[in-house]
Amino acid sequence: MSDFIKNLASDLLRLEINTIIKQNMSAEKIPSNKRVLLRKLADIYRQALIDYGLVKSPHDPTITAKDADIVLRWQFGGEFSFKELALQAGRGIKLMEEQMEKETDTIKLNTWNSRHKILQRIANQSYNMIGIFKLFRRDLAPDTLIQSNEHEDPNKELAYVDKEHFNYLRYQRGELPLSCVPFRSHIETALWNNDLDWGHINSATDLPFLPDMLAMIYKAYEIGTEQIVLQTVIQVEGDITSYITPQYINMPEAIKEIVMGVHNRSIHVSTQFWNTLFTTVINLAGKTFNQIFAKR
């Protein structure tokens, strides 16, 4: 309990309010199954990389042998999937930086810059998810640490590919390299990992996510790959920092007024909730509250 209060108190040192413009909202509730939530987050990141033209899905019928390095083989929501996403996003970041260095058109430069930021978010959040799975692997299946990269062993790789996928038939005919064949559901690692297809996800035991892990996953899912147009950060000392993006500045005045109104109302509600939560933590922690911050 004391560790939970200490972590909560530390999180209260900073309040961040983000306003994003999200298109095509489905109005769906966040999945209660955290495995499903991670799979959907990975799918969002995969689609962004595909939309940017950086990678191809193994289901893309236009795949040729020269696409071997850009085919997304892990189609799930676990450590190996997020590792692939992080690596491909990192490659995309370098490409965007090269584009920005030689671009002279302001509109195109803004596009590359926006995509660069989204790719940085995908890479950073993917590494955060990888860290969660590494903790699970350490605590739930420590003897798998030595074998954690077994899927990268060329002698064992064939055992992990989806032999029913049509790309595998093309591989057998010599049309595609094995690196174009996606991996199958990694049910062997279900104890600590989430590289599972939909059928296996629904039958697998949920993973023991801690509150701070869930907060990280929820935030990543809510923001997704949308661009943040306004951000306000409030520090417990009273410092307030506001960030305004070029996308907001270039909006029509009527839209800017609506967005700013939403952002200001969000700040008001958030600060009220922040104050209430602070009071609750003080009451729970009692005399130890000052000690929590004194040790920082």
Image: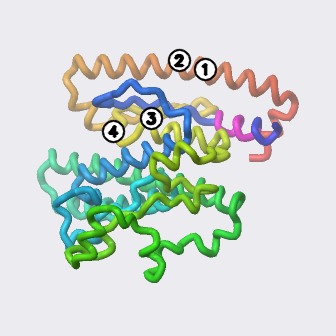
Q: Measure how far apart labels 3 and 4 are at the Cα level.
A: 12 Å
The residue shown at (30%, 53%) is: 49
Q: Are marks 1 and 2 in contact (CB under 8 Å)?
A: yes
What segment carries the magenta color?
6-12
Q: Earlier in the sequence, mark 3 or mark 4?
A: 3
Q: Position of residue 266 (x, y in %)?
A: 47, 21
Compare residues 62 and 12 and report the one nearer the observer.
Answer: 62
- Viewer-side label of 3, 4: 3
Q: Of circles 3 and 1, which is in front?
A: 3
What residue did someone put label 3 on? 222
Q: How many marks?
A: 4
The one nearer the camera, 282 or 202, is: 202
Q: Does dot 4 land on a helix, a strand or a loop?
A: loop
Is residue 270 covered in magenta? no
Write the residue at 26% across / 35% down: 247
Residue behind mark 4: 227
For the point 81% across and 33% down, the residue is 289
The numbered mark, 3 or 2, whose residue comes first in the sequence reads 3
Q: Is residue 128 visible?
A: no
x, y percent for residue 184? 43, 61
Element type at marker 3?
Answer: helix
Secondary-structure class at tag 2: helix
Pointer 4 and pointer 2: residues touching (CB < 8 Å)? Answer: no
